[in-house]
Image (spheres, helix red, strand yellow):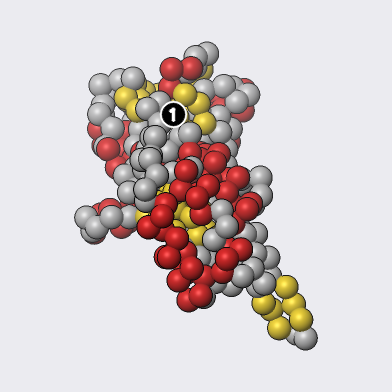
Amino acid sequence: MTLPEARAALLGVKEVSDKPVFVTFTADENGRTLSGGTIESALVTIQAMGADAFGLNCSAGPSIMLENIRKLSGYAKVPLIAKPNAGLPKVMNGKTFFDLTPSEFCKHLPEFYAAGVRIFGGCCGTDDRHITAMHRMLPLLQQSEGIMYSNKEYLASEREILAIDRLSDVVEVDCDEDLMDSLLDAEGKPVCINIVTEQDVENLSENIHAASGIIGFKCDDNELLSKALMLYNGRAFVEGEAEPDPEFGAIKL
């Protein structure tokens, strides 16, 4: 439901397993997570951290999910996942049901495939009939062209993305007791935070929630940099001598 939860789960799994990891989010019809983040930001962040596939589950049904998948397709570097509901839930005689038939459920499969989806499934209201119908269609789709993955690199906060080649007007700030004011004063511009000491990391943990735009870190110590990147729920840029741990997906400038 939120990018912080997904980051924590992905980092945890990667620590104990080398198996492929798939991550899916629930989003509304406008492509927002339940915490208000954007699915594009989630994709950019999560795929950079090493997820093997990314996608969406639940929602109001295939047609609405398709529009959100199309928002993702231009940024994807991994296969996309689609697991829609069998429509919206309805209530009759006190019982909840979903009325999207298997054929209706599968209607948009070719369009999902064209948008980069390679892992298909069903969420609320689907059963063996929906999955069987989907399975029968997939061999026909596999005759289509391969995925056109994005070759551009993006930075991300929880609510916005920015192409790395468009990074400009960066505000550099110290990570001191005035960090919150510095972040608020940046008014959404990209901010590069200097990380020099353990106290800086503590200040960051207390104030990073005030950041509204893209964040980067300038640091010369690998351990301090990793602690800072752990706290940022997005894809950061990095300056300085320190090398970012690949598990955080940051971009070294």
Q: Which quarter of the rendered picture does the N terminus lie within?
A: bottom right
- Tell me what residue is drawn at x 74 percent, y 77 percent: 91
Give the side of residue 186 with respect to residue 175, left or right: right
When the figure is inspected, residue 52 is found, relative to residue 13, above or below; the finding is above
Density class for disc 1 (Cα within 10 Å; few <14, some 14-19, many ≥20) is many
Looking at numbered disc 1 in the image, what kind of residue is underneath it? Answer: Tyr
Give the side of residue 21 with respect to residue 130, left or right: left
**Residue 23: image location, x then y, percent:** 41, 54
Q: Which residue is mark 1?
A: 154
Direction right: furthest residue: 93
Residue in front for this viewpoint, 135 or 22: 135
Residue in front for this viewpoint, 96 or 128: 128
**Residue 31: image location, x then y, percent:** 61, 45
The secondary structure type at the circle numbered 1 is: strand
**Residue 153: image location, x then y, percent:** 40, 27
When the figure is inspected, residue 32 is found, relative to residue 77, above or below; the finding is below
Q: Quadrant of residue 97?
A: bottom right
Is there any visible trace of residue 249 in the rendered image?
yes
- Tell me what residue is drawn at x 25 percent, y 29 percent: 243
When the figure is inspected, residue 23 is found, relative to residue 198, above or below; the finding is below
Direction top: furthest residue: 169
- Tell me what residue is drawn at x 32 percent, y 49 percent: 52
Give the side of residue 186 with respect to residue 226, left or right: right
**Residue 198: image location, x then y, percent:** 34, 36
